[in-house]
Amino acid sequence: AVVLFPLLVLRCRRHPAPLLNLEVFTLPPVAVANVANMLLNFAGLATWLVWPLYFSRIWGLSKLETGMALLPGPILSGIVTASGGRLTERFGHERLVRYGAAISTVAVIWPLVFLRDERHYLWIAPAMGLFGMGWSLTQPPLNAGVLQRVSSDLYGEVNASFNTVRNIAGALGIAVAVTMIGKGTPAHPAAHYNRVFAVFAVSVALCWAVLAFVYPRVSASTRAKQAAA
């Protein structure tokens, strides 16, 4: 990645029809939204690896039990996503993504308070449910909202930038989480895993800060320019 990524950037900058149009990252709404996208999904994808590792390694749950334990996340995510359009119409995407990022921040802070070495599933189930809800209130509305701030001929490239950044962030988050967790089961595993959640909490809290303070200003400026045009 260290060797090939600079070559990819160079190729995309010079090619007449690049694989990824890097010019879209110079558009302020796209750039700021992708910063939030990176910070959210650094934790967003890795979270769904950390929890199964904890359930199986520390609690000794079977694969079926682990899958059942993860259900609050996808269930709430599906419910929220299904009603995302109505929520966006009611609150607007800028307010919605702030709520979503705040809920996601609470979700990754939750284990820092309630995670223990002993089994106590009911105390930590809300963390997974809240993260599924928060992610669904943040990622899809943010993606859709940014598309409203660019011309229609850039829809495909802007969407591609979101997918690319999300996957890169997820790969980095998983790499960091696996490195921090290691192979064994330490004497105090909850504290060991909570170091990972502490890193996630910083990342998602920064995402909320970007969406609460930076993105609205950039979005308002872009709207003003579109109106003037």
Image (cartoon, rainbow, N blue to C red):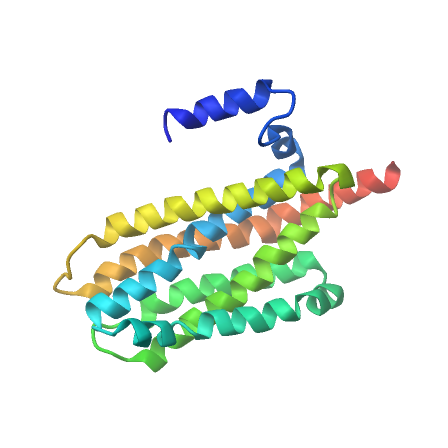
Q: Vertical placement of 6 versus 31: above or below?
A: above
Position of residue 91 measured from the top left corner of the image (x, y, whole percent): 71, 65
> Which image quarter: residue 124?
bottom left
- Picture residue at 75% right of the left edge, 65% below the top: 89
Where residue 130 appears, x then y in whole percent?
A: 48, 70
- The quarter of the rendered structure image containing the C terminus is top right
Write the residue at 42% across / 54% down.
43
Q: In the displayed image of the protein, which residue is found farthest to the right?
A: 228
Q: Position of residue 178 (x, y in %)?
A: 27, 51
Q: Which residue ends up furthest to the left in the rendered image?
A: 187
39 versus 26 height, above or below: below
- 28 to the left or right of 104: right
- Quadrant including the N terminus: top left
Q: Residue at x 14, y 61 (%)?
A: 186
In this rendering, the answer to whether 106 lies above or below 4 is below
Residue 60 or residue 63, whichever sits in front: 63
Residue 177 visible in the displayed image: yes
